[in-house]
Image (cartoon, rainbow, N blue to C red):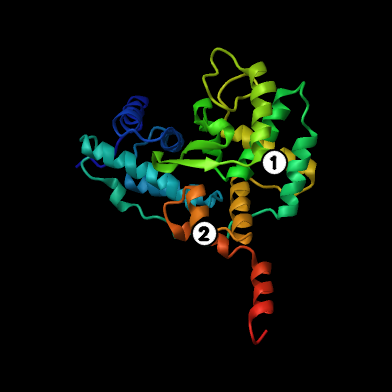
């Protein structure tokens, strides 16, 4: 029984075509699958993929410090490929059945305080220079990430057609290719309008397409560039170093702390399960302590 398969370029190209064109998965999911499988192929070298070698690779990635959530995503990539290969007779056994997800880590999301977010936004605003398109872009990006709570992958996928109602909302395509409409606030809208009027036209090229945010050379903006920009901005602002996802967590936490209905926050963030959003009701410990001290008859 053949229970191994070589991850050749030809095989990976066939799988790429399947998940992109046949299954119609989102561009973000396809990129994640292919990135994981290419990394796995590099790890295997001349060896073939088997259940044992997949487990070794995942264990090696975990020892490298990856979170359980990242390991689960890589495992999903291997599972999807293995089931595809089994269905096409490339392997006689579905090796995905031998893989088990790591136990999920129950960690509260890291957030910035409202004061630190204000400092960060003020720093980005002070750095705006009409002669520097990237400064306009960077300020607009930070305003959008915190103002809407969208994921960084969703942000770089935004196109001009996704800007709705004169900039008052965005049509966002999230996980599972699900669409949702996310409103913006006036400060966010103004920052994006400035980028579109005084920044984007000066970096856009014939190859730019209709992406809302562009790289310095006019190409599609990469998520790693957004992360690098935010890390550097945090350092200059003197606030705790965070990722773009932490701005999403911060926005959700601040909305819940401000009295927003958790189901509204769920819809804004694009969470499939309410339980995911309910994490934010546990983040602001000081607020809970204060409420207990004020309202509990034994406090």
Q: Is residue 259 above or below residue 151?
A: below
Q: Earlier in the sequence, mark 1 or mark 2?
A: 1
Q: Tell me the tag on residue 1.
A: none
Please give left or right for residue 214 compared with residue 49 in the image: right
The x, y position of residue 141, in whole percent, is: 64, 35
Question: Distance between the Cα atoms at labels 1 and 2?
Answer: 29 Å
Q: Residue at x 62, y 49 (%)?
A: 246
Q: Nearer the viewer, residue 263 or 76?
A: 263
What number is the disc on residue 231? 1
Mark 1, secondary structure of its residue: helix
Q: In the picture shown, does residue 57 fall above or below 191?
A: below
Say which residue appears at 57% left-offset and 21% top-offset: 219
Question: For the residue labelled by badge 2, is the local secondary structure a helix, a strand or a loop?
Answer: helix
Q: Nearer the viewer, residue 31 or 279?
A: 279
Left or right: 291 with respect to 47? right
x and y percent of residue 211 in the render? 54, 25
């Amino acid at each position: 029984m053949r229970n191994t398969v070589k991850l050749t370029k030809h095989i990976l190209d066939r799988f790429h075509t399947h998940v992109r064109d046949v299954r119609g998965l989102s561009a973000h999911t396809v990129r994640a699958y292919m990135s994981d499988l290419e990394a796995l192929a590099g790890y295997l070298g001349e060896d073939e993929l088997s259940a044992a070698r997949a487990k070794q690779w995942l264990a090696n990635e975990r020892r490298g410090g990856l979170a359980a959530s990242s390991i689960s995503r890589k495992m999903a990539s291997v599972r999807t490929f293995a089931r595809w290969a089994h269905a096409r007779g490339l392997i006689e056994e579905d090796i995905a059945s031998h893989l088990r997800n790591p136990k999920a880590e129950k960690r509260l999301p890291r957030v910035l305080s409202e004061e630190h977010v204000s400092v960060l936004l003020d720093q980005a605003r002070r750095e705006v220079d009409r002669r520097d398109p990237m400064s306009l872009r960077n300020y607009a990006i930070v305003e959008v990430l915190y103002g809407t709570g969208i994921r960084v992958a969703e942000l770089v996928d935004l196109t001009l057609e996704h800007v709705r109602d004169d900039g008052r909302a965005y049509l966002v395509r999230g996980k599972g290719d699900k669409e949702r409409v996310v409103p913006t606030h006036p400060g966010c809208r103004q920052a994006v309008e400035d980028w579109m009027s005084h920044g984007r036209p000066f970096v856009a090229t014939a190859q730019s397409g209709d992406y809302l945010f562009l790289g310095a050379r006019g190409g599609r903006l990469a998520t790693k560039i957004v992360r690098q920009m935010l890390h550097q901005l945090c350092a200059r602002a003197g606030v705790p170093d965070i990722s773009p996802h932490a701005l999403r967590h911060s926005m959700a936490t601040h909305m819940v702390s401000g009295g927003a209905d958790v189901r509204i926050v769920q819809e804004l963030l694009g969470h499939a399960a309410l339980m995911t959003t309910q994490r934010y009701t546990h983040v602001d410990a000081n607020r809970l302590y204060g409420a207990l001290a004020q309202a509990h008859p034994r406090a």
